[in-house]
Amino acid sequence: MNLLNKIFRARHQDAGPPLDQPVLEQPQAPEPHAPEIPLSTFVELEAPATNSTPESLARLKALSERDLTEQGRQAGYQYHDMAVCRNMEETIRAEMQRALDVELERITLDLAKLDREIARLKGEESMAATLKTLQTQREYLNTRQVKYFEQHFQIAGAGGFADYPIATFRAGFMQGYNAYLEASNLLDQYRMA
């Protein structure tokens, strides 16, 4: 029994004041005035960052720098038809135009974001430097947008960004076509002999 008293007494002592005694609350000091939260916690004071090399721009660059000589050579040897060559060139143009469309869409969205930020900051004298930076970014994006629109029209005429890939494909196609003709002439000569 002694052991049980020790166990239960130890628990009772840890449990706090007995229930029949009133609990006195400690008087708390009045809270001082809450600290002021800085405005920069909720408001972005700097311009939104634009991606320097987005995925769409990297894809556009990769497409415009492709060397399609080998692909053209294989197509020329396999299909040996100029209609196939023209269709493949149209496919290359369409792929380039699609990449340009994606980049133009991204630029349009970035311009809209910048326009909203510029409109918010107009009239704020303390934000003049930030406003100037945003306007410079907007001018740069606007210049790129005009350049890409020009490229879009040039691609339709086999120029612009699509010039190199189409030229290499056509050269490869002609090589493959000539190789096919030589092989078939050689075969015909062999058959005749």
Image: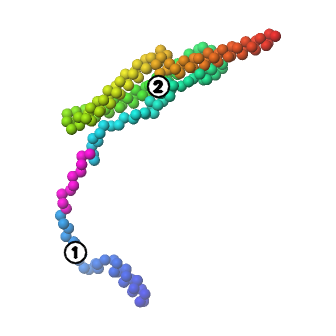
Q: Are marks 2 and 1 in contact (CB under 8 Å)?
A: no
Q: Does the magenta portion include 33?
A: yes
- The residue shown at (43%, 28%) is 102
- Residue drawn at x 18%, y 60% as measured from the top left: 32
Residue for badge 2: 98
* Residue sitting at x 64%, y 22%: 74
What amino acid does circle 1 point to?
Leu
Q: Which numbered disc flags the more N-terminal residue, 2 or 1?
A: 1
Residue at the (33%, 80%) spot, across then down: 13
Circle 2 Cα neighbour tier, 10 Å, few/some/many (<14 / 14–19 / ≥20): some
Q: CA distance from mark 2 to mark 1?
A: 76 Å
* Disc sitting over residue 37 in the figure: none
63 left or right of 146 in image? right
Q: Quick one: which residue is furthest to the front in this view?
A: 129
Segment colored magenta = 31-40
Kindly identify which numbered label has been placed on residue 24.
Answer: 1
Relative to the observer, which residue lies in front, 159 or 116?
Answer: 159
Q: What main secondary structure does the magenta stretch of the protein show? A: loop
